[in-house]
Amino acid sequence: MASVLNVSGLTAGIEGKQILKGLSLEAKQGEIHAIMGPNGSGKSTLANVIMGNPKYEVTGGKITLDKKNVLEMQTDERAKAGLFLSFQYPFEIQGLTFSKFLHAAYKSHYPMEAMSLVKFRAKLKETAKPLNMGEDFIDRELNVGFSGGEKKRAEILQMMVLRPKIAILDETDSGLDIDSLKLVSQAIERMRSPEFGAIVITHYKRILNYLKPDFVHVMHDGKIVKSGGMELAQQLEEKGYSEILAETGIKILEVKD
Ligand code: ADP
Ligand code: MG
């Protein structure tokens, strides 16, 4: 049975400011969803709330994964349950190499596999090949001194190795040059299987030239205001957010395109 992530009527905020205002979304294993929205619409807030970032306060609504209450789980439990978040701004961690970091995460995901560090490093190098990352990065400190593009590719590599049920990719495409964008999109496309679902958060339609989502959602002011297929992304490209939002009857005071 395909796993189902269900978000319903979610309200949440940060530092007393309400950002998500009754957001509902369902994503299943095997599906690729794109969430598009202007800056400040709450996309990163949604991603962080799904993963349990303690900075955000959930004030209402539900998040479930296969009917289990995600909001009651710690972040590491959410990860073990099969959720994954690729950060818009990945953290740098000094003193921890990429391979040791990911090996620890892998062991906690798959405790029965008894994967040694030596075996894991070989697997990591093999998995990294299509991302064109070079071999030295696995001995470098996590994200330290990585370029923007390398950080994003490192996030995708983590996803490929950990094989989440549902991955949330927060603007993995922003700041990528066209070659990195292709590599990253192809890597996500290659993950496509009945065991893998993704919510790809993006500000620009560009990534959707390479990655074909099954569903496209438009987010505005803390809610999903319109859902459709690829044709919706096309309309957004042609008309811009303001016009699409106006068609849904939403009065917009200001959209930061
Ligand atoms: P998006 O990812 O769609 O650009 P965000 O979820 O990052 O949007 O932000 C949504 C809103 O929350 C924005 O108006 C932003 O200014 C506000 N916001 C984000 N972080 C904070 C914070 N630490 N304190 C107050 N407001 C914040
Ligand atoms: Mg964001």
Image (tube, rainbow, N blue to C red):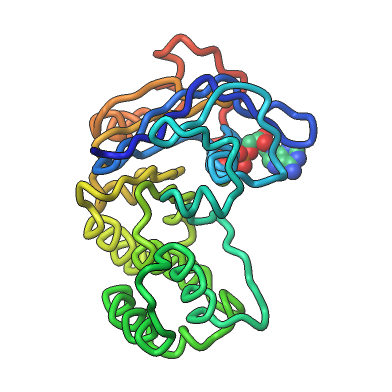
The quarter of the image that holds ligand 1 is top right
Q: Residue furthest right?
A: 16
Compared to 23, does 84 lie above or below?
below
- Give the vertical position of 147 relative to 79 (above or below): below
Q: Horizontal and vertical percent for residue 92?
A: 63, 71
Give how far across and how far down residue 232 sits, in percent.
29, 29
Q: Whole-percent x and y of residue 132?
A: 32, 79
Q: How many marks?
A: 0
* 139, above or below 227, in the image: below
- Which residue shows up at 24% across the image and 43% down it? 30
Of the pair 239 and 70, the residue shown nearer to us: 70
Residue under the image location 56 percent in, 54 percent down: 76
The answer to whether residue 25 shows anywhere in this view is yes
The extreme top residue here reads 249
**Occupied quadrant, residue 34:** top left
Q: Quadrant of the N terminus?
A: top left
Residue 221 shows up from this direction: no
Q: Which residue is more in the foreground, 100 or 243?
A: 100
Residue found at x 28% / y 81%: 126
Q: Looking at the picture, how far across and down is residue 169, in whole percent?
A: 44, 51
User: What residue do we see at 48% from left, 22% from top?
Assistant: 8
Observer-nearest of 98 and 247 = 98
